[in-house]
């Protein structure tokens, strides 16, 4: 019997504080995500830890930027520093001093221009750089955090919601998925490319955020006259929540398939390693002492390795089927969205 989402949450992450900050991929463009990846920012669902400070994500604050902007700013300041005394000397009638300061200022200006010409191309081609257009769009990025799902820390005023717990479970499972050996193994190269883990987790988070906001709005109108309607609306939201919970349970089943494949991959690795060692031992025997039974024994080891390979092929096929179930979210999502829209129309 499949575990309920609450029992999974208690066993996987119930004792840990929710710490995550997951980006909604559709809220920013590919150029922004490429720059963030180049900087080493962790913002995906499977990241081992979350980004808590995001002020620098909209700025170009790295080495090539510092060299170009800092150098040109310093050169401009030096040029201005010579230009001011030159102007004062000229007004005071000291022509020689004005010419001297003017020459120094011109030299500084030329030097600044040369420095800018050398450092600007490197800065403009730096993969970490955000263009002016993308810097303005970074503020539009949408994040899923514990607070956005109704979580508040603290003993007295603290609170939690089922939506936050469910999403915390989804993030925990995603982090475990990307840490499995099978997820990064060459045997799953094509398979993994079909499973957009970030999109799947972000989709769950976005729907849960809608449920939290809508439930709060519904609860705000509860009184003696609307109590029956409120309970009806909340029951509809419960249907949508169950759809999300089933989605996360499917995600956990997918993770379990990966762990089974992990074990078989390890067995295959050990079998292949054993076969290599057997070949070396057989080679030593052939060069040192005759042993008629050794060759047959090592052939049996090769058969074991081939058997492991066939088992893995079967597991990959089962994993594909599990992934299909995991990706079959359209029907559930449509039902959940319809329930939310119906509740919203009823409130209006």
Image: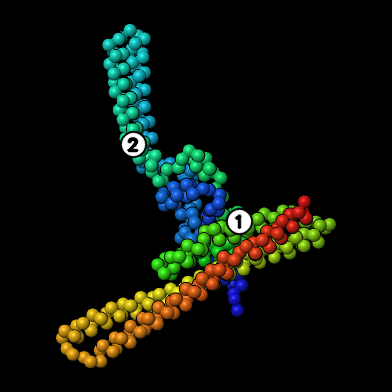
- Secondary-structure class at tag 2: helix
Kindly indicate the quadrant of the structure image that contains residue 11: bottom right
Task: Find residue 185 and report its horizontal and vertical position in percent.
Answer: 40, 68
Task: Find residue 8 and report its horizontal and vertical position in percent.
Answer: 57, 71
- What residue is drawn where x is 31% and y is 77%? 273
Which of disc 1 and disc 2 is earlier in sequence? 2
User: Is residue 181 in view from this perspective?
Assistant: no
Task: Find residue 110 and report its horizontal and vertical position in percent.
Answer: 31, 25
- What residue is drawn where x is 51% and y is 61%? 196
Residue, disc 2: 119
Residue 136 to residue 13: above or below: above
How packed is label 1: few (under 14 Cα within 10 Å), some, or many (20 or more)? some
Residue, disc 1: 206
Question: Which residue is situated farthest in the left direction here?
Answer: 288
Residue 9 to residue 221: above or below: below
- What residue is drawn where x is 59% and y is 66%? 328
- What residue is drawn where x is 45% and y is 74%? 261
Kindly indicate the quadrant of the structure image that contains residue 222: bottom right
- Secondary-structure class at tag 1: helix
Q: Is residue 24 left or right of residue 102?
A: right
Q: How many marks?
A: 2
> How far apart are the two marked residues, 2 and 1, measured between alpha carbons?
42 Å
Query: From the image, which quarter does the N terminus lie in?
Result: bottom right
């Amino acid at each position: 019997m499949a575990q309920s989402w609450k029992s999974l949450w208690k066993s996987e992450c119930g004792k840990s504080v929710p710490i995550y900050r997951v980006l909604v991929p559709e809220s920013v463009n590919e150029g922004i995500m490429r720059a963030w990846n180049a900087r080493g920012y962790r913002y995906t669902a499977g990241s081992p830890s979350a980004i808590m400070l995001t002020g620098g994500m909209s700025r170009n604050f790295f080495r090539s930027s510092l060299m170009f902007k800092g150098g040109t700013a310093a050169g401009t300041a030096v040029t201005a520093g010579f230009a001011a005394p030159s102007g004062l000397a000229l007004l005071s009638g000291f022509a020689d001093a004005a010419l001297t300061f003017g020459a120094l200022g011109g030299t500084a200006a030329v030097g600044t221009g040369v420095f800018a010409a050398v450092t600007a191309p490197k800065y403009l081609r730096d993969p970490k750089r955000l263009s002016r257009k993308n810097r303005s769009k970074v503020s539009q990025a949408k994040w899923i955090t514990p607070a956005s799902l109704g979580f508040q820390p603290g003993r007295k005023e603290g609170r939690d919601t089922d939506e936050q717990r469910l999403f915390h479970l989804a993030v925990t499972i995603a982090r475990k998925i990307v840490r499995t050996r099978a997820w990064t193994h060459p045997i799953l190269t094509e398979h993994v490319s079909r499973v957009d883990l970030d999109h799947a987790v972000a989709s769950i988070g976005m729907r849960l955020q809608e449920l939290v906001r809508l439930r709060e709005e519904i609860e705000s109108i509860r009184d003696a006259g609307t109590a029956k309607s409120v309970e009806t609306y909340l029951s509809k939201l419960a249907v949508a929540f169950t759809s999300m919970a089933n989605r996360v349970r499917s995600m956990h089943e997918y993770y379990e398939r990966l762990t089974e494949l992990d074990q078989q991959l390890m067995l295959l690795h050990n079998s292949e390693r054993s076969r290599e060692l057997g070949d070396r031992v057989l080679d030593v025997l052939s060069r040192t002492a005759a042993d008629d039974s050794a060759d047959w024994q090592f052939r049996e080891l090769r058969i074991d390795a081939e058997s492991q390979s066939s088992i893995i092929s079967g597991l990959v096929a089962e994993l594909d089927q599990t992934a299909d179930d995991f990706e079959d979210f359209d029907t559930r999502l449509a039902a959940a969205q319809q329930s939310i829209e119906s509740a919203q129309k009823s409130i209006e």
